Every structure is written in structure tokens, then in C-alpha cells.
Image (cartoon, rainbow, N blue to C red):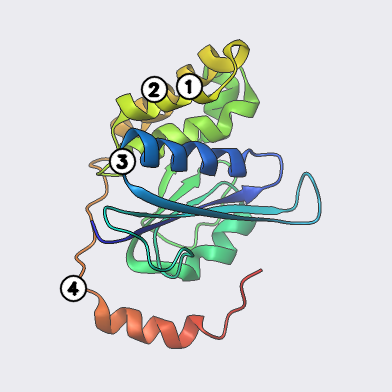
Amino acid sequence: MARYEIRLSGLGGQGILTMGKLLGQALAIGHSYYVTQTQSYGPEARGGASRADLVVSSEPISYPKTEYLDLLVALSQEAAASYYSYLKPRGALLIDADLVRQSPSSVALALPFTRLAREKVGVPQATNVVALGAVAYLLPFARIEAMRKSLKESLPEKIRDANIKALNLGYQEAKKRLGEPIALPDPDGDDDIQAARMDLTEIMTED
């Protein structure tokens, strides 16, 4: 796998940055991939825009920032609208079904992460880990066992059980509702399309 780009996005208070750190650590330590992780958040502690970007590769990474996303996770309407244009033509969009009411794509993958965390886990703050479980299922190069082990080693004991429950729930719900995991991109398949998209995205400014 030469390069795979992921953006996790939503609002401050949804645990986006923590989700990015957990995913990056699991892929780097538990799966032995090269991983870079960058993050951005708005001026407000809660309610402002928040995102975490990861580049994953089986080879050393020459450029650490995302350019064309293979997977976009959007846990807010604002995130879906703002970042969808950065997704590759064959990239996957994963949204919170309750919080993104107007999806920019008719083929978006959707699960009610916030509702699942509240009703099934009993901890609304575990929304990000429910979403992480779904990401663990969808990524064709991720193993749930390694993700679970990394989570156990990263979290304090008092919140560990609830978060493992959230991770398992997200994985099982994704497996039940979202079909097959995402196919890895063809490294030679979208050159012309990406070149055309570059002309458009170069005029956009990253915050």
C-alpha cells in the first residue's frame, strides 16, 4: 500500500483529535505501518470545527499532509459540506446519520454514531470510539484485534471497558449495515481525474 489518506472531522467536543491519535497509534504500533497525523481545530473549545488527518503507508511517507482523501469521516453537517470536495472520486464518505441530514453524496455510508453511543453504550462521549470501530471494519488493512489492543493500552482503566464496548459496537454495526470493507485504491487508476481535481483544489485554502 503506497499511500492512504484519511480525514476524521466534526465539531469540538466530539473527540475528533483523540480519535485521530487512537487510530494513528493503532495503525503504527499495532499494524507496523508508517503513519503521519496532523490536526486542526477552531478557536472555540466546543462547537468549533475540528479535524484530524492521517496518511498511512507501508513505505516511508514523503509528504505528511493529506492531499486527496481516500476516506472522509464526518460527524457534523459542517464537516461533510466543508471537506467533501477533498475526497477522491472513488473515495468513501462515512457520516453520522443523525447529525448529517443533507449528505453531499448519495452513496455515503451512514451510521447513527451519537445515538448508538448514548443508547447502547450509555456514554454519549464514546461517539468517537463507536465511529472508530466502524472505521476499523471499513479499512481493508486494519485488524480489529490490533485496534482493540491499542485502545486497551492507551486508555485509563476507569473508562476502558466502556470504550472497548463502543469500539466493538461500531465494528459490528458497520459489518451488519455497511456491506463489504472499502477496496484499496488502484494506484494507477485515477491519475487523470486527480490531475483535473488538482487544478480545482489548489485554489482552496486549508485552515
User: Is 25 left, or right, of 143 in this rendering?
Assistant: right
SS for tag 2?
helix
Instruction: Answer whether residue 131 is visible to the viewer in this image.
Output: yes
SS for tag 3?
loop
Q: Is there a contact, CB below 8 Å, between mark 1 and mark 3?
A: no
Viewer-nearest residue: 111 or 71:
71
Alpha carbon distance from label 4 to label 2 = 34 Å
Alpha carbon distance from label 3 to label 4 = 25 Å
Alpha carbon distance from label 2 to label 3 = 14 Å
Q: Quadrant of the N terminus?
A: bottom left
Alpha carbon distance from label 1 to label 2 = 6 Å
Alpha carbon distance from label 1 to label 3 = 16 Å
Q: Earlier in the sequence, mark 3 or mark 4?
A: 3
Q: Quadrant of the C terminus?
A: bottom right
* Numbered badge on residue 32: 3
- Tell me the mark number nearer the camera, choosing from 4 and 2: 2
Residue type indicated by callout 3: Ser
SS for tag 1?
helix
Q: Is there a contact, CB below 8 Å, between mark 4 and mark 2?
A: no
Q: Is residue 168 above or below residue 140?
A: above
